[in-house]
Image (tube, coloured by chain):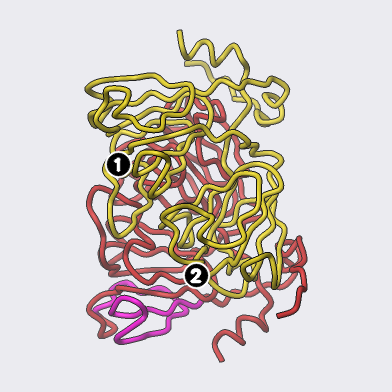
Chain colours: A yellow, B red
Amino acid sequence: FSHTAIQGNILSHCGMFLSTRKICLIYDQENFQGKRMEFTSSCQNIMECGVDNIRSLKVECGAWVGYEHSSYCGQQFILERGDYPRWESWSGSNAYHIERLMSFRPVCCANHKESKITVFERENFIGRQWEMCDDYPSLQAMGWPNNELGSMQVQSGAWVCYQYPGYRGYQYILECGEYKHYREWGSHAQTFQVQSLRRVQHVQRYRRNCKDLIA
Amino acid sequence: FSHTAIQGNILSHCGMFLSTRKICLIYDQENFQGKRMEFTSSCQNIMECGVDNIRSLKVECGAWVGYEHSSYCGQQFILERGDYPRWESWSGSNAYHIERLMSFRPVCCANHKESKITVFERENFIGRQWEMCDDYPSLQAMGWPNNELGSMQVQSGAWVCYQYPGYRGYQYILECGEYKHYREWGSHAQTFQVQSLRRVQHVQRYRRNCKDLIA
């Protein structure tokens, strides 16, 4: 190993090189064992690909969302680049555990650097509002008056909202658009409760690097 | 409700008003039921306060760390401002669940705005290094070569490192100082695996607001 320091501003450096390539490797056993498949686009039902379920995975490029059920239903889990050897590595410590994923898709508009969301106190974009461009592990620490968000508008980037502070509990992945009631956050949403919120991290990497990963 | 927008730069605004007050309300039953106690400083063993265990809590000021065992041992859980009605709300979705906390303490040097950490590829501060001032849900997405950190130096602020991407898995709360081996990250650390890392959020709030909270 050399003592080379990784240059500080990787984000702005890589931002110049657009890559739309997204790669997700899935396995039907824990710890990257069993049947293995490589995906570069969404999968509505993993059983149609000849795999019973997903029990571990590696994200090599891009950001993805995994779902409890087929057809992008049930609990949602944000999957950014890295290794996910078992269900605990994607699950949000909810009361009931999702030990496998049945469908998944890339997050298309993630842009860590230029993300913007407006949150509203009440449904239908009324009440107090707050425009955010950063990650907030506790909305209440920043002055938000309670443990709920009524509605949201994502202007740019992609965001993950969490039921509890510190990015825990139910997750809701929100891409550009309007979410005027919790029913629009996802098929598993049952409450307005949101206590932390962050940008999805997706670095536009060198195209060359992504090719290296496939090789 | 008025349509008042909460001003964007709350952080820098509040940074002018120092408050050392930290308040944590604990309950021995879930959902903020049962025996209730208010703390403004650390507690080495909750049983010595006449409470068997902590099953729910509210952080009203400051950032705290909760521990699986007494004397600040076992798994660590970062607790920022907000409501924690059940163990899932603080647990990091690990293979074994911590359904109660036995000791806790405030995080003293948290400073969301001016946090700095240097991470190293290998133990004892050798190998590639990277100085960070922001939150990173995936270190690999930013170019870090593997799923481990060898050692760390926290120059300012307080940080949470996580085993898995997206702030999941085992948590390690690191305050100013040197951590030259995973054994120094916490009594529960058993691996160098760290795939995401973020600042602890603690806003220096108006002293008046904190008083209001107690009233």
Residue range highlighted in magenta: B23-47
Above or below residue B147? Residue B133 is below
Name the residue rendered at 30%, 32% in the picture.
A56
Q: Secondary structure at mark 1?
A: helix
State whether residue B123 appears in this view: no
Q: Quadrant of the C terminus of chain B?
A: bottom right
Name the residue rendered at 37%, 65% in the picture.
B66
Percent coordinates x, y for residue A91 in the rendering: 35, 47
Residue highlighted by disc 1: A87
Q: Quadrant of the N terminus of chain B?
A: bottom right
Magenta-drawn stretch contains B38: yes
Residue highlighted by disc 2: B82
Alpha carbon of mark 2 to alpha carbon of mark 1: how far?
A: 26 Å
Percent coordinates x, y for residue B82 in the rendering: 50, 70
Magenta-drawn stretch contains B27: yes
Q: Looking at the rendering, which quadrant does residue A205 occupy?
A: top right
Please tell me how crowded label 2 is: few (under 14), some (14-19), or many (20+) other residues with Cα within 10 Å: many
